Image: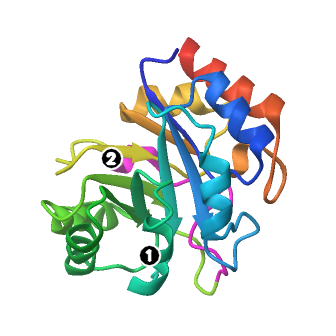
């Protein structure tokens, strides 16, 4: 078991959910965003989360979702946190947390140092920040594209909440990422796939093993 938290994101089958749990993942991510190849509906989240032990967190990843959509997810009872991965403001994040009574994560899209510094605005509004690579303008997806940002940008920044690192992580580079950033949580999606949206049991197992050995 790794001393670090590991989130395997974009899971969509019971087989890969089971492999992530067995490999030692502490968090599982389920994407609810129709444009994503990893999209699952609320009832699918319920089915996927049903066999997951209660000590493993189950995170719904949404992009600028409205309250009706969030309510459908929350009402499944399958989710232990909501990850906001769009352009949600601090005020919107705080409102979501207050309305649904679930911990809220906010993904921060990073290209420059100022992007990371903007995370300070979410102090007190969210339970965790997730630093991810900023996708190109006009890209269909806000994450999950295998892009990484310059990890050195995190040096010396006071991060106002528990946080995690995402974007372009792989079995080969995860130890470098941990050493350079000191990230307490590592979040991977495309880095453990055979094709967009198609998770690999073997890669999930290998990634978690690699993190444990870092």
Residue density around tag 2, few if under 14, some if 14–19, many if 20 or more, within 10 Å:
many
Above or below residue 149? Residue 180 is above
The x, y position of residue 103, in whole percent, is 30, 55
Q: Where is residue 202 in the image (x, y as percent from the top left)?
A: 82, 29
- Start-end of magenta stretch: 139-153
Q: Decide whether the magenta segment is chiefly helix, strand or loop.
A: loop
Q: Is residue 211 magenta?
A: no
Between disc 2 and disc 1, the foreground one is 1
Can you tell which quarter of the image residue 197 is in?
bottom right
Indicate the position of residue 156 as horizontal and vertical percent values.
21, 42
183 horizontally vs 189: left or right: left
Say left or right for 41 vs 68. right
Spot occupied by residue 33 in the image (x, y as percentages of width and height): 62, 75
Q: Which residue is drawn at 62% across and 87% down?
A: 138
Q: Which residue, given by chain and number where applicable, does mark 2 sit on?
A: 154
Which numbered disc flags the more N-terminal residue, 2 or 1?
A: 1
């Amino acid at each position: 078991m790794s001393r670090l938290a590991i989130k395997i994101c974009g899971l969509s089958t019971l087989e890969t959910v089971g492999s992530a749990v067995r490999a030692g993942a502490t968090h599982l991510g389920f994407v609810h965003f129709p444009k994503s190849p990893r999209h699952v509906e609320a009832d699918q989240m319920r089915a996927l989360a049903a066999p997951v032990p209660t000590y493993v967190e189950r995170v719904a990843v949404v992009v600028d979702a409205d309250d009706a959509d969030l309510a459908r997810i929350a009402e499944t009872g399958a989710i232990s946190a909501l990850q906001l991965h769009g352009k949600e403001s601090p005020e919107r994040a705080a409102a979501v947390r207050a309305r649904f009574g679930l911990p809220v994560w906010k993904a921060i899209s990073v290209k420059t140092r100022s992007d990371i510094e903007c995370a300070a605005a979410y102090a007190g509004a969210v339970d965790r920040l997730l630093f991810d690579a900023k996708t190109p303008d006009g890209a269909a997806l806000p994450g999950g594209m295998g892009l990484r940002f310059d990890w050195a940008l995190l040096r010396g920044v006071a991060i106002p909440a528990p946080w995690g690192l995402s974007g372009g992580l792989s079995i080969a580079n995860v130890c470098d990422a941990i050493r350079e950033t000191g990230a307490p949580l590592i979040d991977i999606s495309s880095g453990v796939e055979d094709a967009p949206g198609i998770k690999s049991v073997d890669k999930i197992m290998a990634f978690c093993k690699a993190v444990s050995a870092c």
